Image (cartoon, rainbow, N blue to C red):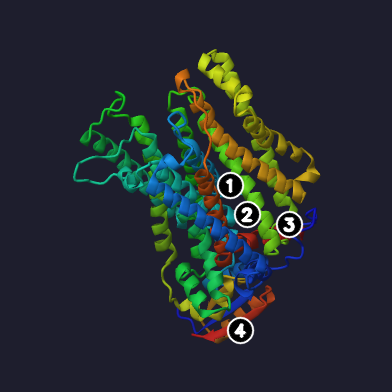
């Protein structure tokens, strides 16, 4: 849907932000973006973030198996007799494998985070919005897309009524 | 600092902390706008000088050899391993505290998790020095890494030394990632706050383009929790491995199945003592009274009390195991603990680790600053004594009477210990000037939940 304007609002608390978000949904506005100073519960969406958990789990398991295989291979490659203990001492091979599981999972998770959250993008159009800079410090920010001039005014009214302390209309 | 931390109406934040911006400014103003105080520079200078002396002692030890230490042919481990175990214990606690409290949804962690995690990074770095030093031939420490050498020699995976190598390496790198994931949103706050351009660019680079959008929060929160799930078993395994360094041997006093859990609880115990001390210093020095409140000290004191009871039970278990087994060498170790040459140190350890935290049964003392400082210091001293006594008592009285030999540390031993302590303090002072010492976004969330609960 093409938008003729976008309405921006800042909220100093979570509840007016949630109210505005709910009403905007109900009244058919497109929510183009939402930012917050912390991870509000309404942002959560288990389905959206499931790939991160899977990435952590799979990279962790691959790391652990690789480490176990490395320990096994190198023990036979250099068959050192240590107090007549068996070469294939799998119990102790599990120790570095367990440690590496966590590290490999964390590295995989970081990569997944960067991909999923679009990080390392130091220059993003959102940074041109002055309001977004406040999201990291003190405000919730909501951006609504408006498909006509009258809808834009409605959007601004909606945002002000639900408790925004700052609103702005930007022509698209 | 007032003798009693004042009680408040709200539980985890003071009413004086009014909004999200207030949280941001409370934590960031001392960091970015205020010049470091005279006390800061004095502490900075003193810690730097002591650390330099310590690192000179390390350099001297590398040049001359372990003959400079108190280690002898019987007590072959001495200070380096005791210091290693002590530091890794403190290092374990930061990530354990942070991840356990995150998983159990203890929102009060917001005020303490950041510096607890920083404590982990610095303490593990200090811990990592000692096994390398203890090798004697430090230039070959990389032989513990599996790489295709020309002589086709591979690491000895059945050796506790290699277990330690992987434990420290993986744990340190994991902790850095865990710390960084929690730090990204706060780096963005530093980037977006008016201030010097150079620093903002620096923070902007580290923030990696974080905006605080719903999508980013979802991903960050999910990964943070996933890493916390990995962190808890990792931390337990790291210190269990340290426990196994001892327990996997066939030496009386060490070959005990209780060692791994006993070491993990000891790590939590000493780590929380350091967290209490750091919290008190930061609260005073950075005026964080609104964010680090009496309830935090009350909660941490209760954990110290609980851990001290477990420690007491562990000591009893050691004595009971020796008595129940009837093994002469085990009984001799217990007898040596109470009647031998190290008896004053052993009794001091019991007083510090088991008796002193019992003061926290009195609710008033759990928020009494001198008591908190005294007990935390006692716990740290007690835990260090425990580490050195595990080594000294067993190795001084092994199976062979002809090997019985006492241990006494040298100036170089003490200089290295003091040097690492000072280096830890120095690193922390640098950290407190660069990174927000409390998690901004989690404190904001805590504030929001407290405000909504009030209204």
Circle 4 is placed at which residue position? A153
The residue indicated by pointer 2 is B112
- Mark 4 residue crowding within 10 angstroms, few (<14) / some (14–19) / many (20+): some
Relative to B170, does residue B40 appear above or below in the rendering?
below
Q: Nearer the viewer, residue B162 or A148?
A: B162
Tell me, yes or no, whether dots 4 and 1 are on the same chain: no
Q: Check disc 3: other Cα within 10 Å, few if <14, some if 14-19, many if 20+.
A: few
Q: Marks 1 and 2: in contact by CB < 8 Å?
A: yes
Give me the chain letter of mark 2: B
The quadrant in which the C terminus of chain B is found is bottom right
Q: Are marks 3 and 2 in contact (CB under 8 Å)?
A: no
Circle on res. B97:
1
Instruction: Name the residue: 79% across, 57% down.
Output: B2
> Secondary structure beneath disc 4?
helix
Q: Which residue is mark 3?
A: B453
Mark 1 / mark 3, whichever is N-terminal: 1
The CA span between labels 2 and 1 is: 9 Å
Q: Quadrant of the N terminus of chain B?
A: bottom right
Mark 2 or 4: in front is 2
Same chain for marks 3 and 4? no
* Spatial CA span between label 3 and label 4: 35 Å
């Amino acid at each position: 849907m093409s938008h003729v304007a976008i309405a921006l609002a800042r909220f100093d608390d979570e509840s007016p932000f949630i109210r505005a978000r709910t009403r905007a949904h109900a009244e058919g506005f497109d929510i183009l973006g939402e930012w917050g100073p912390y991870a509000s519960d309404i942002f959560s969406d288990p389905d959206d973030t499931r790939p991160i958990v899977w990435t952590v789990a799979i990279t962790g398991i691959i790391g652990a198996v690789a480490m176990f295989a490395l320990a096994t291979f190198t023990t036979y490659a250099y068959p050192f007799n240590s107090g007549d203990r068996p070469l294939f001492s799998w119990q102790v091979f599990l120790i570095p494998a367990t440690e590496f599981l966590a590290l490999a999972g964390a590295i995989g998770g970081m990569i997944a985070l960067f991909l999923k959250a679009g990080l390392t993008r130091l220059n993003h159009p959102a940074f041109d919005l002055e309001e977004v800079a406040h999201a990291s410090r003190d405000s919730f920010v909501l951006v609504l897309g408006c498909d006509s001039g009258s809808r834009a005014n409605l959007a601004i009214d909606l945002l002000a009524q639900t408790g925004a302390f700052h609103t702005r209309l930007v022509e698209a | 600092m007032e003798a009693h931390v004042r009680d408040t109406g709200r539980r985890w934040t003071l009413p004086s902390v009014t909004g999200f911006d207030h949280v941001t400014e409370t934590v960031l103003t001392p960091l970015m706008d205020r010049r470091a105080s005279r006390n800061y520079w004095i502490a900075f200078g003193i810690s730097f000088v002591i650390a330099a002396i310590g690192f000179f002692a390390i350099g001297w030890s590398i040049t001359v050899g372990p003959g400079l230490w108190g280690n002898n042919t019987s007590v072959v481990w001495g200070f380096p391993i005791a210091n290693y175990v002590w530091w890794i214990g403190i290092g374990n606690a930061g990530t354990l505290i942070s991840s356990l409290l995150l998983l159990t949804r203890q929102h009060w962690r917001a005020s303490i998790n950041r510096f607890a995690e920083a404590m982990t990074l610095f303490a593990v770095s200090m811990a990592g020095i000692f096994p390398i030093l203890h090798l004697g031939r430090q230039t070959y420490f990389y032989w513990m890494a599996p790489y295709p050498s020309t002589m086709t020699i591979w690491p000895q995976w059945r050796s506790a030394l290699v277990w330690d190598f992987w434990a420290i390496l993986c744990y340190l790198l994991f902790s850095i990632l865990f710390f960084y994931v929690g730090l990204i949103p706060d780096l963005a706050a530093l980037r977006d706050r008016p201030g010097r351009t150079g620093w903002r660019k620096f923070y902007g680079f580290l923030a990696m383009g974080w905006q605080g959008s719903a999508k980013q929060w979802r991903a960050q929160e999910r990964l943070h929790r996933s890493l916390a799930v990995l962190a808890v078993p990792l931390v337990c395994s790291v210190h269990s491995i340290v426990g196994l360094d001892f327990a996997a041997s066939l030496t009386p006093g060490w070959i005990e199945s209780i060692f791994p859990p006993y070491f993990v609880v000891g790590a939590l115990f000493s780590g929380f003592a350091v967290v209490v001390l750091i919290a008190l210093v930061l609260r005073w020095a950075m005026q964080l009274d609104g964010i680090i409140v009496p309830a935090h000290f009350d909660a941490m004191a209760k954990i110290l009390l609980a851990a001290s009871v477990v420690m007491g039970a562990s000591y009893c278990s050691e004595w009971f195991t020796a008595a129940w087994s009837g093994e002469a060498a085990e009984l001799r170790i217990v007898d040596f603990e109470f009647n031998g040459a190290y008896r004053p140190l052993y009794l001091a350890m019991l007083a510090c680790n088991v008796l002193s935290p019992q003061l926290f049964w009195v609710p008033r003392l759990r928020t009494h600053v001198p008591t908190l400082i005294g007990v935390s210091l006692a716990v740290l001293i007690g835990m260090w004594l425990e580490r050195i006594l595990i080594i000294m008592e067993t190795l001084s009285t092994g199976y062979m009477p002809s090997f019985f030999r006492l241990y006494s540390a040298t100036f170089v031993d003490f200089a290295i210990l003091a040097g690492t302590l000072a280096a830890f303090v120095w690193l922390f002072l640098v950290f407190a000037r660069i990174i927000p010492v409390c998690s901004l976004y989690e404190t904001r969330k805590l504030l929001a939940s407290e405000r909504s609960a009030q209204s």
